[in-house]
Amino acid sequence: MSMIRTENLCKSFHSLEVLKDVSLTVEPGEVVCIVGPSGAGKSTYLRSLNGLETINSGKIWIDDVLIEDRDKGSHVNKVKMPKQQRLAILLELGMVFQRFNLFPHLTALQNIMIAQTKVRKRGEAEAREKAESLLRRVGLSDKINEYPSKLSGGQQQRLAIARALAMDPKVMLFDEPTSALDPELVGEVLNVMKKLAEDGMTMIVVTHEMAFAADAADRVVFMADGVIVEQSPPSEFFTNPKNDRLRDFLRRTLRKEE
Amino acid sequence: MMKKALCILFAALFATLALTACDNGVETKETTTAAAAIASPQDLAGKKVAVQTATTADEYLNDLLDKGEINFEVLRYEKITQCYDELKLGRVDAILVDEVVAANYTDVSKIVWKNTEGEPMGICLQKGNDDLTAIVEAMVDTCYFDGTMTALANKYFPYDVTEGVRTVTEKPVLDLTKLKTITPGKLTVGMEIGYPPMEYLAEDGVTEIGFDVELAKKFAELTGLELVLKNTAWDGIFAALEKGEFDMIMSAVSITPERQGKYNLTEPYISNRLVLVVPN
Amino acid sequence: MEALLSLAGRLPEWAGPLLENLKRMIGWMPSLLKATQTTLLLSVLSVLTALVLAVFLALGKISKRKIISKPCAAYVFFFRGTPLLMQLFFIYYTLPMLIPALNIKSRFVAAWIAFALNVAAYLAEIIRAAIQSIDKGQLEAAKALGMTQWQTMRLIVIPQAYRRMIPPICNEFVMVLKDTSLVSIIALTDLTYQTKMIASNKASAMVYIPAMFIYLVITAVFTFIFNKLEKKLSVYE
């Protein structure tokens, strides 16, 4: 029983191979952090899970349901599924983007409500109640009727998290959630994420924040050049890296953090 | 909410405007049906007449309207050819035009009325340019004497436009000693090309042909100057003459008292009158 | 004392003709303003009609289905690639000669059609650009939240796009207002036609002053309206 399982994912952009046979399994309730140098394929991997990128070959299971099965060279997904079913599975994944991607013409409340009412078809009252409770959860109750442009970066990202949570996903995908934030705003977002982890949410987080990974992750995955080089619990990952490449990477990044 | 209001406003605005436009634009529907009933300008009541802007025909219709006895719509076009296009397409009931042109369009129109008052044409020069005017007069006389006029008339008209215009019994004297043009060595003539058969373009769309064109070429020959034709829009041609852009206008210029007051006009070189034409 | 008297004597000299001209210009105003109705009506109707057509063209051009996007692209290419004057003549003179049934008797309607078709092509590009200027990240977020393409267009893209369209649409309207002067060539009594009539028939070139003044006033009023509209819609920026 797994939440997310990928086998032999391959993805190329024109002639550039970005993912080379990536296989990874994430159990329910697990918090997995993916780290690595730029261009390693981390974001691409994350985005292929919810269909923002289409893989060239490989298999993807979400909540034990096979949704993608492609062979090299064929452009066809062998898994045929009615649209409604595919949508239902997609909704089990929630995504938080590096640049927030909030809807600027909607208030904070409306941002959280819109997908609830239009996609999940919830009633307005129910959606509003949920939105308000989520805003409380991420600490933005006083910004309920503000437009995103009036919020700081950290507030916007917390709003984005609330928006994703409103759809009641089973897995939360974070694509470098704090990379676009001013350093002093990073902490408030990481705190929300930590609490989420403590509450038992399955999370896959692509990040450069090593302290967060050490703190909140159940497993840390190191990707470089499109392959998973090493993965282990944080206790081992940071103190006892086995791979040279990883050692190198840690030396450079951890030194920067000091 | 605001959006719905805007949409309704949009639709309402559009509807009202469209209705006003249709009211405005549909105009009189009886364009072609009663066309046969026109026998004179008095029959133009409630009809649409096309004219070329700023011609004597235009003035005639204005005067008629000013009298206030009948009311009709005058449509003014820059070129007489447009008037005939409109007539062909049934958008106007009649055209008031020079007889010299009407003869050219007998395939699409017929003359129903001719003005009893004749309107012969002359060559137009700047006021005070008496020397050149005298030379031009002499040249016209020469052309009448040596048969050039008759030949051109036969070439371009189905009837004799030179009849009774001038009687020249002895060979005119052409004194070129006082010849002076705005550009030495050149005879610059202003014309509105697009007035068949007086001045218009041949099928190739480039070569100027016509009664006035050939007459101008003859003048150049007689004076030994190089001919330069300046194609000018009709509603600016007199202003251009006053500015000194050409030596003379040879462009089916009707002789009127008003024009005689403002410019030097030669004696008539071709006969003409206003006629009213309707579709065949 | 003498200087003052001579000054008083000199004043009426050039003031005379000036007042005379002003009197004439005021005398022309009623007929000019009546003709302006046609100019305004034609401009507004053409742009409104074009707007409706342009939305379909823009969405069509964006469409991934070649069978829709290619004809839309061809339409835009044709109407932006040929002069408006020729399009007007084509609809008014050429079409009736090719297909007698298409003889549009009304000058106004012919002009309306020609302008609407022409402006639609330009507006389609404006609309398309506004739609495509919406940050792709928002489209991804909408997709991640489960919205369909159509929902994304309706709820996310268009509400933001139409605010961005306002300045270029205002520009287009101002251009159309002046392009309507072309209809004077088919003897439609718009402001320019009336101005030319007064200029040539009464032989007075002074009439261009009040005429241009009227065009300016209309431009100013509409620009003001559009600016107000834009401000009203930009609450969230």
Image (spheres, coloured by chain):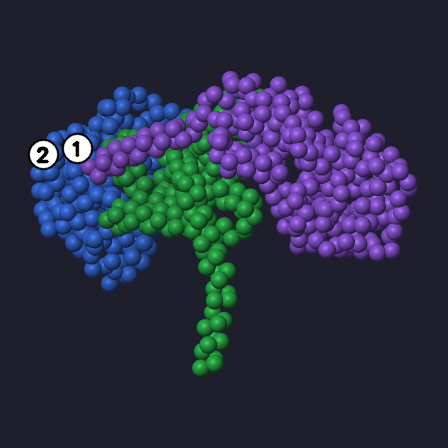
Chain colours: A blue, B purple, C green
In the rendered view, does A153 fall on the left or right side of A139?
A: right
- Mark linked to residue A126: 2
| Residue beneath the point at 84% across and 37% down | B167
Residue density around tag 2, few if under 14, some if 14–19, many if 20 or more, within 10 Å:
few
User: Residue A132, position in %: x, y?
Assistant: 10, 42
**Residues at marks 1 and 2, CA–CA distance in whole angstroms:** 9 Å
Amino acid at dot 1: Thr
The residue wearing badge 1 is: A117
Amino acid at dot 2: Glu
Farthest residue to the bottom: give it.
C1
Answer yes or no: is residue C52 visible. Answer: no
- B34 or B117: nearer the viewer: B117
- B235 or A71: nearer the viewer: B235
User: Residue B88, position in %: x, y?
Assistant: 59, 23
Residue density around tag 1, few if under 14, some if 14–19, many if 20 or more, within 10 Å:
some
B226 vs C8: above or below: above
Q: Quadrant of the N terminus of chain C?
A: bottom left
User: Residue A248, position in %: x, y?
Assistant: 33, 55
| Residue beneath the point at 47% across and 69% down | C11
Marks 1, 2 in one chain:
yes
Q: Secondary structure at mark 2?
A: helix
Which quadrant of the figure has residue A187? Answer: bottom left
Answer yes or no: is residue C30 visible. Answer: yes
Sequence-earlier tag: 1 or 2: 1
| Residue beneath the point at 77% across and 54% down | B130
In the rendered view, does C135 fall on the left or right side of A169?
A: right
User: Residue B32, position in %: x, y?
Assistant: 52, 20
The subunit letter for the residue under badge 1 reads A
| Residue beneath the point at 43% across and 29% down | B25
